[in-house]
Image (spheres, rainbow, N blue to C red):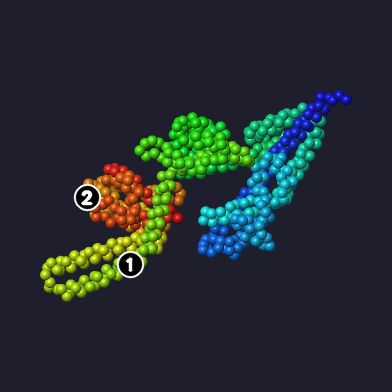
Amino acid sequence: MRLGVKSKEAIAVTLLTFFVVITTTLIHLSQLSRVIVQEADRQAELIARQIYSQSALALGRAPRRDAREVLRRDRDLRSFLDASVGYSPHLLYALVADRSGRTLLHTERDREGVIEPARPTLAEVSQLDAVRRFVTLYRGAPIYEVTLPLRLNDVPFGSIRLGVSTTLLRRELTAALWKSMTLAAIALPVAWLVAMGLAQLILRPVRALAEEVDRLRRGEFEVGGLTAGDDEFQELSTQLQSLGQELEADRLATLSEKAHFQHVVHQLEDAVIFLNQERRVLFFNKAAETVLGRGVEQAVGERLDDLLPASHPIPSLVDQVFEAGGGVRNATVRLGDGERPRELLVSVFFVTDAGQVMGAAILLKDLESIKTVQSLVSYSARLAALGRLTSGIAHEVKNPLNAMMIHLELLKEKLEGSPEDVEQSLEVIGSEIRRLDRVVQGFLRFMRPQELAVKPLDLNALLHSVVALLDAEWHSHDVQFAFELDPALPLLNADEELLRQAFVNILQNACQAMPHGGTVTVRTGREGSELVRVSIADQGVGISQDDLDKVFRLYYTTKPGGSGIGLSVVYRIVQMHDGAIEVHSESGRGTTMVVRLPLR
């Protein structure tokens, strides 16, 4: 039997419609399955992080007790654990296990104390392709888990595990599948009936829909709305439009996550460089610009060997990793041959996806900053050791000094009318005893723990009052003060008297560093969303590079008659406020002290 033109057109339109419906349905179901799995994983991970925070609060309330016992007995944590299962429609259970896998807390209490078997992770399901994801959801394990490592004092302690039921996931996916199949079943016969009577008219919207599907396949998500009228093809076009909007939203979310990742990496102090399998640069942060010698725009896509000279040690380490496999951890390299070469700790490791090597990441740490942190830790340890000596010093030094002063006054009364040289010797003894007492008092004030009287503080007003106090003293020495204060600076929660003492010491040092006069510039401003910055710069004699790391040491001073306590007191006050202080100076060009204080 020979088919007529209209029959052929009807069959062609029907087949084309069938193809379009099935294709869009499969794409929709693929995206929907991925979204369902990812949403379940995201909700479970969010709950796991909340359980982690609740666990940290429980451990913080009893820092010296056994951590396992604290977690078992904390009622708030158990209540939160029980409530978390009802929060997500996909969760079956939540548990907290120690490092060996033994259950400490479980929403099913009869399973506490046993070792729970390891289960596959839900994140693995979301990374599968559409077919394998469907097979996994309908044929795979009945339960998948979302696991968050639990650390105690930066040491692995255990894990938080949440079980997600594939049965509940399938129920949601099956409902969507039936809807899609129902839509397809309705669209096909309607398309056949319409094609039989209006084949010529139907071919036009079918071609339009085919073009939209092709655009969707090419990644052009602005599809749908091209078919006029109010028929099934318009409905299908609307479905394509909705699907395109969902895909576009997913793409924008991916771009947003990528931008957020790049922002986070840019904030790192350590240099990070990402390479692909051809060892071409994919991305690096700002800290790595000094190593590569150019910006991201100029370096992306270039081979690492072309960006760095042949004698540079980093490309050889990368070659070693790619050729031998494994990775390199904390290899020390030396960059530059000048007076101050940089020493870096370099780590190179592979970046994999689903077990496949996608490229490599290079992490570079500046040894100088690490040594600075180690020096600060050592300094804090020495301060703590000195603090333990204060009580002994108070008894062993102050009490004898008081006794000596009392007996000296008694001796003066008994020797009243003695020769002038005797009275002069007694005055010298008394003066030296008082001087020694002042030294001990200064040491005790520095070392004795203090309670912060925290209250809202206008930092600009405090600096104005301190400068007004010092201006009267130093105006005659040709010292002027200049202000560059941020008028929008928020109030700071701090101890006003301690900060006043700290800034008096800093400004006093700045004035003393300018024996021939000059200008002291005081600046304030925001640094990010959580810090305020105070900068005090002078035009004095400066500090040599060899002395910069010693200025905050107790009793270290380069000033004649200085006690070496002032900047140590400043350092301690800033530490008590959870702040940081740093000094920048060059001999003959002045010094800048920078104090950063948290707003909280």
> Can you tell which of label 1 and label 2 is closer to the viewer?
1
Check the image and report above or below for 137 versus 335.
Answer: below
> Which quadrant is the C terminus positioned in?
bottom left
Check the image and report above or below for 254 versus 396.
Answer: above
Say which residue label 2 marks: 477
Q: Which of 592 and 358 is in front in this view?
A: 358
- In percent of width and height, residue 217 lies at 67, 33
Q: Which of 97 and 194 is in front in this view?
A: 97
482 displayed left or right of 359: left
Q: How far apart are marks 1 and 2 (CA)?
A: 39 Å
Q: Nearer the viewer, residue 209 or 139?
A: 139
Q: Are marks 1 and 2 in contact (CB under 8 Å)?
A: no
> At 30% across and 63% down in the image, what residue appears?
440
> At 54% across and 56% down in the image, what residue appears?
152
Report the residue that reaches farthest toward the front.
324
> At 70% across and 51% down in the image, what residue appears?
143
308 displayed left or right of 252: left
Three-letter code for the amino acid on which mark 2 is drawn: His
Mark 1 or 2 closer to N-term?
Answer: 1
> At 21% across and 72% down in the image, what residue appears?
409
How many neighbours does mark 1 have within 10 angstroms: few (below 14), some (14-19), or many (20 or more)?
some
- In percent of width and height, residue 497 lies at 35, 60
> Which quadrant is the N terminus positioned in?
top right
Q: Quadrant of residue 85?
A: bottom right
How many neighbours does mark 2 have within 10 angstroms: few (below 14), some (14-19), or many (20 or more)?
some
Say which residue label 1 marks: 394
- In percent of width and height, residue 72 lies at 60, 63
Q: Which of 298 and 427 is in front in this view?
A: 427
- Secondary structure of residue under mark 2: helix
Check the image and report above or below for 556 versus 345.
Answer: below
Three-letter code for the amino acid on which mark 1 is drawn: Ala
Check the image and report above or below for 496 versus 237.
Answer: below
